[in-house]
């Protein structure tokens, strides 16, 4: 996706389970593993950030330039738990991402960085 020079570069940085769920409070992850989210966040020089439950809408609108995901070595499996890019209704369309980088971090976390195409 071409980014307008007038729009800030936006990174969606999240921590998810292997099945894409977003509520880590009950996950069996070490304190060092949990700190990886903030370590990665501090390494970026982004113009903008989004965190929370609007990721799907922002992606559909073409407003995300990069997806940064720390994948925890956990399967959540709870259907009611929000996922990375949930969108209500039929507004969503699949988006292609291009892998830019992957790195193994503490506590078997994987840091995946994707460019949104």
Image (cartoon, rainbow, N blue to C red):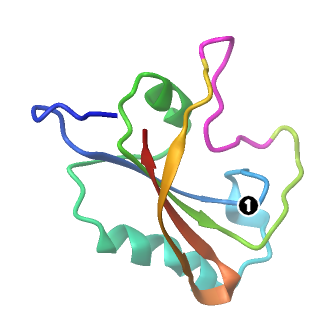
- Taking the spot 49% from the left edge, 51% from the top edge, the residue there is 98
Rendered position, 25 above or below 52: below
What residue do we see at 71% from left, 40% from top? 82
* Mark 1 neighbour density, 10 Å: few (under 14) some (14–19) many (20 or more): many
Residue drawn at (41%, 78%) of the image = 39
Left/right placement of residue 81 relative to residue 94 reads right
Q: Secondary structure at mark 1?
A: loop
Q: Nearer the viewer, residue 102 or 28?
A: 102
Residue 90 in the magenta stretch? The answer is yes
Above or below, 110 against 92 in this view is: below
- Position of the C terminus by quadrant: top left
Q: Position of residue 51 (x, y in %)?
A: 46, 47
The residue that disc 1 covers is: 17
Q: Farthest left residue?
A: 6
Percent position (x, y) of residue 34? Answer: 59, 76
For image coordinates 11% across by 35% down, the residue present is 5
Tally the numbered discs: 1
1 with respect to 54 (left or right): left
Q: Quadrant of the N terminus?
A: top left
Residue 51 counted in the magenta span: no
Quadrant for residue 109, please give it: bottom right
Q: Give the quarter of the image for residue 90.
A: top right
Q: Position of residue 89 (x, y in %)?
A: 69, 12
Magenta: main secondary structure: loop
Where residue 112 sits, quadrant-wise, is bottom right
- Which stretch is magenta? 81-91
- Outermost residue toward the top? 90
In the image, 82 versus 2, the foreground residue is 2
């Amino acid at each position: 996706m071409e980014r307008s020079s007038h729009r800030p570069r936006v990174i969606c940085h999240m921590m998810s389970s292997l099945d894409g769920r977003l509520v880590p409070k009950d996950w069996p992850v070490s304190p060092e593993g949990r700190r990886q989210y903030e370590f990665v966040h501090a390494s970026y020089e982004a113009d903008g950030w989004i965190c929370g439950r609007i990721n799907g809408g922002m992606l559909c609108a073409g407003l995300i330039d990069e997806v940064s995901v720390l994948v925890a070595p956990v399967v959540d499996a709870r259907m009611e738990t929000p996922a990375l890019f949930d969108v209500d209704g039929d507004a969503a369309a699949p988006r292609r991402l291009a892998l830019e980088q992957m790195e193994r971090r503490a506590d078997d976390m994987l840091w995946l960085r994707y460019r949104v195409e």
